[in-house]
Image (cartoon, grey):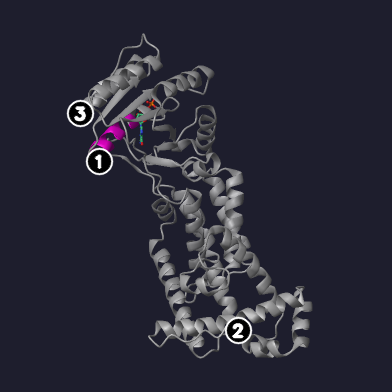
Amino acid sequence: EMFGQLTTGLESAWSKLKGEETLTKENIVEPMRDIRRALLEADVSLPVVRRFVQAVSDQAVGTGLIRGVKPDQQMVKIVHDELVKLMGGEVSELVFSKSGPTVILLAGLQGVGKTTVCAKLAYYLKKLGKSCMLIAGDVYRPAAIDQLVILGQQVEVPVYSAGTDIKPAEIARKGLQEAKRQNIDVVIMDTAGRLQIDKTMMDELKEVKRELNPTEVLLVVDAMTGQEAAALVTTFNLEIGITGAILTKLDGDSRGGAALSVKEVSGKPIKLVGRGERLEDLEPFYPDRMAGRILGMGDVLSFVEKASEVMRQEDAEELQKKIMSAKFDFNDFLKQTRAVARMGSMTRVIGMIPGMGKVTPAQVREAEKSLMVMEAIIEAMTPEEREQPELLAESPTRRKRVAQDSGKTEQQVSQLVAQLFQMRVKMKNLMGMMQGGSIPALSN
Ligand code: GDP
């Protein structure tokens, strides 16, 4: 099983939360230690593990438990979403050139599976309906050229080769010329791999790159090398500039460190993964599927997603009732503003909050800041004051006390109270319109 050890390590984290009623700073200490250990044993790089564990802890104690969801289940979901983020979020597609042939330059150390990837990639692209040509650029190993020619015959794509008595950049130039002549869609150039990085290798690659002006420069790395793969991607990117990585040998007993570290360490995405020796064993890298495979808990994940969907729905209905009866109070205000800060689905409500018509990321950050002020003020209110904002509207003494207790100014408190009443009016008007009533005269 792929990444089996990592999966088992993480399972021990969930198991420690069984029987708990909520997630707290205290009860996640042990599980977080398990997660940390599991990731380190999978050979994920240490700074990445640190950031990951911090992000998961923050969310575990920072967001309330979704109704009907158990703490261990919610933890699975949090870890899943962070894993997806760690691996780059979305799938990173191959880019194709809009004019002339798409040129893919492949680099990598010896033995990582680069030659095999050339053939697999041609096979993959042919299935997408693209015509391909391979260029044999490993001028140091005649055997590598022969291997590519044989693979090319298997995939039924032309292979351009010019022997070993020629500079790689020269082969690149001639090969590209030939591809253009044949109207080829995608040109894939294999380059020499060495046992380790050296200057000659980098210089040659730079020259080839200059010659080809490639659409994609992909570094082929071996998943078995763990976080070393991420370090290689970083180095190649700094030296020659690459567009992404191809991770091979994911079918072996690799531990996951490469898949989890490459994006975070190098900033470059894994675009494709090799999962076997056959031609068809190359596929796009899907961060969410990968996270799902690592956790092996698809049912839990979809359950938590549904539960949070239901909760949002119930909240929205509850809110609507309150708005219609003008009972919208500070508790709702807080809940709603939090939902806005989390970029919840109620975009209509966002538009009604003064100063938040169209929402940009900067505005979301701004909203988060003012949310913190609001939270402090609302927390300093008594339960009666939260439910009956009139109490505060009518009493300067109460407002003064809230200001003192929250560490905010009286003006900020007054503003917040005024804002609540403004929202009541606006929401009521809007609901009236939405329910087909006559358009009321706005009273403010
Ligand atoms: P190169 O030196 O980088 O060109 O490496 P090759 O393409 O010659 O591959 C080296 C070895 O790794 C060969 O035996 C391949 O069959 C094997 N190989 C390549 N990719 C994969 C993969 O995704 N999974 C497995 N199991 N083996 C692979």
Q: Residue at x 52, y 23 (%)?
A: 197
- From the viewer's side, name the closer residue of 158 and 399: 399
Residue type at mark 3? Glu
Q: Secondary structure at mark 2?
A: helix
Q: Position of residue 342 (x, y in %)?
A: 53, 66
Residue 118 within the magenta-colored segment of the rendering: yes
| Predominant secondary structure, magenta span | helix
| Disc on res. 128 | 1
- From the viewer's side, name the closer residue of 311 and 299: 311
Q: Quadrant of the image for the C terminus?
A: bottom right
Q: Position of residue 298 (x, y in %)?
A: 39, 61
Residues packed near mark 1 inside 10 Å, few (<14), some (14 to 19) or many (20 plus): few
User: Which stretch appears magenta?
Assistant: 117-127
Residue type at mark 1? Leu
Cα–Cα gap, marks 3 and 1: 15 Å
Q: Residue at x 66, y 73 (%)?
A: 374
According to the image, label 3 marks what residue?
156
Residue type at mark 2? Phe
Please identify the residue farthest to the front as the structure is shown.
441
According to the image, label 2 marks what residue?
421
Q: Say whether disc 2 or disc 1 marks the residue closer to the N-terminus.
A: 1
* Picture quadrant where residue 137 is located: top left
Q: Residue at x 74, y 83 (%)?
A: 399
